[in-house]
Each structure stands twice: as structure tokens, then as C-alpha cells.
Amino acid sequence: MKTKKLKIIVVLPAYNSEKTLAQTVRDIPSGIIDEIILVDDFSHDDTVKVAKKLNIRTIRHTKNLGYGGNQKTCYRSALKLKADIVVMLHPDYQYDPKLIKHFVEFIKEGYFDVMLGSRIRSRNETLAGGMPKYKYYSNRFLTMIENVATGQNLSEWHTGMRAYSGEVLKNINFQKFSNDFVFDTEFLFEVVKKGYKIGEIPVPVRYFPEASSINFARSLKYGLQTLFIALKYLFYK
């Protein structure tokens, strides 16, 4: 009996990514992905122009909706194209696109419904990759709280490289989540609540000037929002 070919789509939530977009797309493994969708969140640089030169499907917001708002458009667009697996990858080259094939295989083979790329293998390795110390320690602290709240044992809850089965995206109402950075946290808590299986694989740490990164004030806001969501989950339980 012939197995149905799964449709694999990579979505790129982009904002001012002109300097790193081409390298990111070039490193996406050929022969695995059926389509790439870039959603530009009203960038002020030539991200859209670069995307069109690369001949990838491009959607541009007419105003800035935020990181979560960008992802919502990404997933809606992928589902319209009947994606079976959707890989979310930041186009700032902070995460290694060559690892996409491993994310896809774990979901395709039925081991997991969601895959995360963890940048946290050891403290020395993570800091050597350029992650600021305050981000490393806050990441570890928040991940510990989230694991305790949910009963999970993930090494990182805050990665920007994720893959979802189409079933997960169809059955989770991601439209109700924040348009800000805490979207990812809300999504993952809902994944746990619905009983989906989460897997993770290590990915290299890449922090460099062109890679996107939120500042300390935004990081603090994100951390407080994450703690609030963890508390809400505990009350839900």
C-alpha cells in the first residue's frame, strides 16, 4: 500500500531580515520541503525585495502586528495550502536550517506532534555561542518553572525553531493568543493541555549583530508574562 506523501511547509516570520534571509533560505535542505512562506511584518528594510528575488511565497503585513501576529498569518497561510507539517524558522540565521530534516522525520514517523530546537546543552556551549548571560539564566529559570507547572522535562521552552503537525495547528485556536513574543509560550502550554507529545533536539547557539534579539526591557516583560501564564496553568490543573 502506497503511503501518502506529506506536505511540508517552512514558514519564516520576518522583520528586517534582509541581511540574513538569503543565507537562511539557501541552507534549507532541498528535496524535503514543498514550499516556503515568508510573512513580512512591515519591515523597514528590503526583506520583501530579497524574498521575491529568492522566488519564495511572500505575504506582507500593511502594519506591524508583532511576533505573535506574524506567526498567526504564517500558520493560517500554511493550513490554507493543506500543510501536514509546518516548520517555523526565524529568518535571521540564528537557527540552523540544515536541521529541518530531523524535525520533520520525528513528526512524520509519529514519535512526536511538536518538535523544539533546544539551544541549551551546556552553560559553556550556550554562552560561547553568544547568548547574553542574563538571557541564559532567565531562560533556565523560566524553563524550570514551566516544567514544574506542566510536568514536562524540556531543556528549553523559549526556542525560535519549532515544528508542528498539521493536526496540532488545526486543533489549537492560536488566534486567541497574544500578538507579542509570549505567543510561543501560550502555544506550548496549550499543546501540553491538549496532551500532544513534544520532542526536542539540540541546535547550535548563534548570536551575532544581524540576528534579531529583544532588549532587556522587552525580555523582562516577556518573563513576567511567562510566569503569569504558568500560574494560570497551575490554577487550570
Image: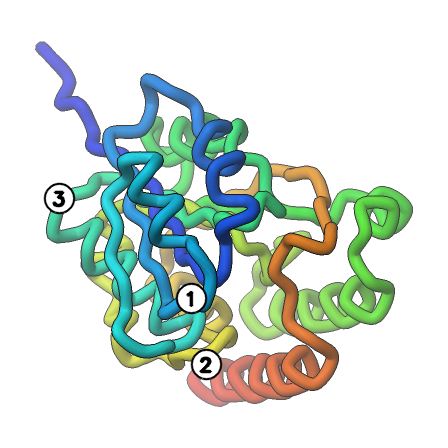
Q: How many marks?
A: 3
In the image, what residue type sits under mark 1?
Ser
| Distance of label 2 from label 3 (alpha carbons) | 33 Å
Closer to the eye: label 2 or 1: 1
The residue that mark 1 highlights is 43
Which quadrant does the N terminus fall into? top left
Q: Is disc 2 surrounded by few (<14), some (14 to 19) or many (20+) residues within 10 Å?
A: few
Instruction: Give the mark nearest the N terminus, 2 or 3.
Output: 3
Residue at x 35% of width, y 49% of height: 49
- The x and y percentages for residue 35 are 25, 35
Q: Is residue 88 left or right of residue 229?
A: left
Q: Which residue is identified by label 3?
A: 82
Colour scheme = rainbow
Q: Is residue 175 above or below residue 98?
A: below
Q: Does the residue at mark 2 contact the one at mark 3 (Cβ under 8 Å)?
A: no
Q: Is residue 85 above or below residue 58?
A: above
Three-letter residue code for mark 3: Lys
Residue at the image point whose x is 45% and y is 81% from the top: 237
Residue 68, percent from left and from top: 40, 71
SS class of the residue under badge 2?
loop
Quadrant location of residue 222? bottom right
Q: Nearer the viewer, mark 2 or mark 3?
A: 3
Task: Give the residue pinned by disc 2.
Answer: 237
CA gap, disc 2 and disc 1? 40 Å
First reached walking from the N terminus: tag 2 or tag 1:
1
Q: Say if mark 1 contacts mark 3, CB within 8 Å.
A: no
For the point 28% across and 46% down, the residue is 37
Say which residue appears at 17% left-offset and 52% top-offset: 79
